Amino acid sequence: MNPEIQELLVAYRVVRPALFPVLPAAVLTLFGLLALLVDVFELGRTRGPAEGETGTPIMAPYLALIGTALALGCVGWQAARLETAGGPYFSGMVVLDGFGVFLSGVVLAGTLLTLLLTIGYCRRHDIHLAEYYHLILMAAAGMLIMVLAGNLITIFVGLELMSVGVYVLTGFRRTRLRSVEGALKYFVLGAFSTGFFLYGMALVYGAAGTFDLAGIRDAVSVPPASPVLLAGVALLIVGFGFKVALVPFHMWSPDVYQGAPAPVTAFMATGVKTAGFAAFVRVFMSTFDGLADQWIPVLWALAVLTMVVGNVAAIRQDDIKRMLAYSSIAHAGYLLVALIAHSDIGTAAFLYYMAAYTLMTMGAFGIVIVLGEKGTENTSIERDYAGIAWRHPLLAAAMALFMFSLTGIPPTAGFVGKFAILSAAVNSGHVPLAVLLVLTSVISAYYYLKVVVSMYMRASEREPIRSQVPAMAAIALLIAVVGVLGLGIFPGQWVEMARASVVAVTGLP
Amino acid sequence: MLTEYLPIVFLLFVGLVVGGVIIVLSWRMGPRTRALSIGDSPYECGLVPTGDARSRVDVKFYILAMLFILFDVEIVFLFPWAIMFDALGTLGILVMFEFLVILLVGYAYVWRKGALEWD
Amino acid sequence: MSEVGVGHYLTLSAILFTIGAIGVLTRKNAIIVFMAIEIMLNAANLAFVTFAMSIGDLGGLVMVLFVIAVAAAEAAVGLAIIVAMYRHRETVNVEAFTAMRG
């Protein structure tokens, strides 16, 4: 055999095992690039609706769907082979553990639902650009990298791949002022938070001498902690706080959620939040484990603020996207309580809640998306949602289910998730936080049930919404409904899975 | 030590002296006529400027500049690879190939979208 | 006068970071806000290089390459968003961007 080819084969054998953990991200990247290329070389494009207008990309959405489904399959394969998966991969840049694989699944499920909902939305609002799907796939690839990162550099690269894609997606409807304004606000505050994140990384690097999460863990486990290290940790909290929208770093989120196209908002509320929290929890639970006494009080204060402000501010919102933005801030507070519990039970509760939250938020946004009409998204709770139940009984019932789940009423996924977080918090002695969580959930019932009341008990004063649910969106909604009920009625298996996934993260890496 | 900065201080001093001497000499020895308004124009021996200097720049420059920055900066990753070329071997070539293919997709996109066409 | 050491570089980087952060919070022009953000990123770069040299670890230098690449991508996207905003409002004053509030 040709020596060059032989050398290539040797190189391939070196690379192959390392590819296993990044396979889903690689598949997403490949299909993302394909979607772009196929469109730009006008393969599989139909002629546009009018003369001179660009055609509808009929390939890109399906390529994106296939890519995401394949990536989800790869995650399943990773989950099955988790026991035998050795490491470290890429000199510890990437870790493959139960925690990461579980959240990869959650991120990809969110992406899949986003894509299913997007296709009908794009058709209705005449967005016929393959870039849209390309950006979603690349952002999802960034999320997967973040979720599996074993090194601060990888976290940063994944974070930016995700963020830059989502900035563009937010402003995708560039003829609409709100979309662009949301993009600008998101971009400025996102880049600002990147600055804090990077400076925090620099200080941690200076104190620990490495970017490797395991290396930093070893370096910081020796007390006393240096002031440089503590300053770095504080800046990292600010950076992560911006990304997952904790109060007081949440100012951007209502405007951005309201301005972005509804499927992008759904993607942001689920995928971006999952990936951000994944890195947050991994860094603080395992890497800064030795500093728990220092960061727990800070996060404690942030959790209290986030739960109170998020829930109270949501009450006076009439725009449903804005209401869901504050609701997602409030849920970030609940997730933070799971992190503060600082135990295996807490992390398992976090994983379970993340999955439940993704399904119910995706479902709620799904209803918002299918109720939109050409040219308008119909987002006023008082005006547009009044009397929906009579015209679209199934959609209203599904929306009611998602609202109950977000409130935390049994037998839904939201209830089990909140229960898991509560028991983790009480177990770790954070009774005041648990009490506050319950109290703020009671407040949240007011604005979630307001939607239900509007749908079922108000007469519509406007022209009725004529909405035809696209088949793909119907599938997505069905998945969300079944998921929310399934996780709520038969939680045992899922909670068990979350528990099993945690064993690997604490023994990390 | 501070002595390391001595050459810079010296250079600064020489620059100031030379600049000052030239200005003073031309002021002392030059002709005293301010009557010629041509002396006040931006290009004394060039074309007569027309219009405002703060005119709008064509947005095409912006797109090209943006593309230039993007592709230019990506090349930065080639330098460490080039230095370590021998040590990285075939594996390095493969990985860099993959990186360049992704860049190439970006280039193909830019090209097919017509961003490189001036008219 | 002592040798210019790690402390000096770090102080400079901290000053730059503070200038950037204050710039983001106080300036009105979106492009200047964006420049202030770039100053923050470069302050972090300076800190990375300083720590890398003082520790004797190459990781910090690698990180700087990534930060530069990401900053370029962010610049492209950010300026495009600012241009899109200008087309709507004919201004880049961030205080004028108030289509949504509450």
Image: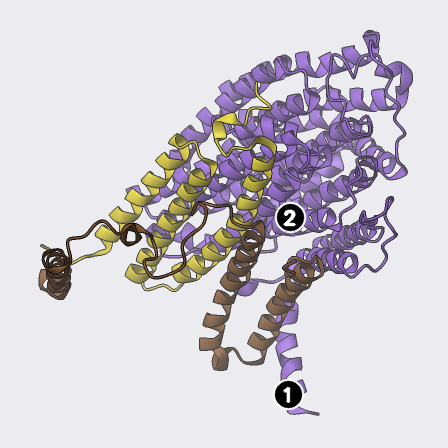
Chain colours: A purple, B brown, C yellow
Mark 2 residue type: Ala
Please give left or right for residue B55 compared with residue C20 in the image: right
Q: Earlier in the sequence, mark 1 or mark 2?
A: 1
Q: Nearer the viewer, mark 1 or mark 2?
A: 2
Q: Nearer the viewer, residue A142 or A32?
A: A32
Instruction: In the rendered structure, find residue A139 and report the number of the disc placed on it.
Output: 2
Question: In the visual, does C50 lie left or right of B55?
Answer: left
Q: Secondary structure at mark 1?
A: helix
Q: On screen, A255 above or below A509?
A: above
The answer, for residue B17, to whether it is visible in the render is yes
Viewer-closest of A411 and A152: A152
Q: Position of residue A247 (x, y in %)?
A: 50, 26
Question: Quadrant of the image for the N terminus of chain A?
Answer: bottom right
Residue A381 is situated, as x and y percent measured from the top left of the image, at 73, 16
Which residue is at a point 55% across and 16% down the rendered structure image?
A435
Cα–Cα span, label 1 and label 2 = 36 Å
Residue A84 can be seen in this image = no
**Residue of label 1:** A4
Q: Residues within 10 Å of mark 1 (few under 14, many from 20)?
A: few
- In the picture, the disc for residue A52 is none
Residue at 34% across, 53% down: B42
User: Which three-letter amino acid code belongs to the residue tagged 1?
Assistant: Glu
Q: Secondary structure at mark 2?
A: helix
Relative to A403, A333 lies left or right: left
